[in-house]
Image: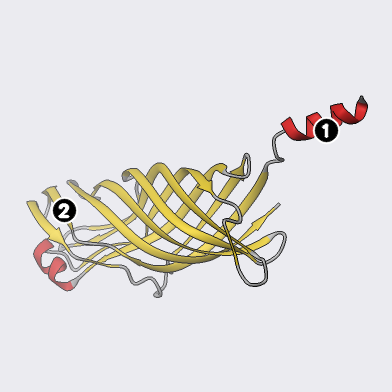
Amino acid sequence: MAGLLMAGFSISAPALAETEISLYSGAQSAPRSGVDISDHIDLGDRHITAGWEGRSFSKPYYWGARVTRWENPNFGWGAEFTHTKVYADKDTLAKAGMSHFEFSDGENIATINAMYRWPGLWRDLWRREITPYVLGGIGISVPHVETVTAHDRTWGYQLGGPAIRLGAGVSYAISTNWSAFGEYQMTWSRNDVEFDTGGSLKTDIITNAVNIGVSYRF
């Protein structure tokens, strides 16, 4: 009887949860976006379309980190931070009337994520697991606003607005605890920020990134 009870418990009990810490970097870009400037001491009111450069491999580098709590083999949740970056190109600087216009330290995105994976869906020749996954998250943007005009220098972190993250990738088991992964990620963020001398700037920024990283689970 005791054996039957133990067998029944082992079948019905959920798998033990595990925590996974992931670090990554990669190549990140951003398409053009509209920028609205209001009540600025030098610029007045204007609307421009900004062209952005990512410069992922220039300091400060593009990178990200996340912590995931896997509640069962398939579903997990957690938090993620990504140091994305955007730099206005030369044409945008001319149109904006600025000598410097960047969110380069950076266009920071912090989200709470939900993740779903298919453990060991594929295996390589050495029987190591290859696990595809998808993720989505909601959170905030915290841009480091860097703008310079004739009479204004705005330089610092501000709360930009809401942010969304979507991604998909594959994880490759290296050992019991370690894995490597590659993924695509997209972020959208609203950035409603203020100039130090008065006025405001608004723009919605989308980033696209191909990431490579490592994860440790315990």
Amino acid carrying mark 2 in the image: Val
What x and y, as percent, mark residue 60?
A: 42, 69
Q: Which residue is identified by label 2? A: 35
Tag count: 2
Q: Which residue is identified by label 1? A: 7
Amino acid carrying mark 1 in the image: Ala
Quadrant (top left, top right, bottom left, bottom right) of the N terminus: top right
Which element carries disc 2, helix, strand or loop? strand
Which element carries disc 1, helix, strand or loop? helix
The residue nearer to you, when weighing 202 against 7, is: 7
Residue at 13% x, 70% y is: 91
The vertical placement of 41 against 77, above or below, is below
Look at the image and tell me whether residue 120 can be seen: yes
Look at the image and tell me whether residue 104 can be seen: no
What x and y, as percent, mark residue 139?
A: 40, 42
The nearer-to-camera label among 2 and 1 is 1
Residue pushed farthest top? 1
Q: Is residue 78 left or right of residue 218?
A: left
Residue pushed farthest right? 2
What x and y, as percent, mark residue 191?
A: 27, 48
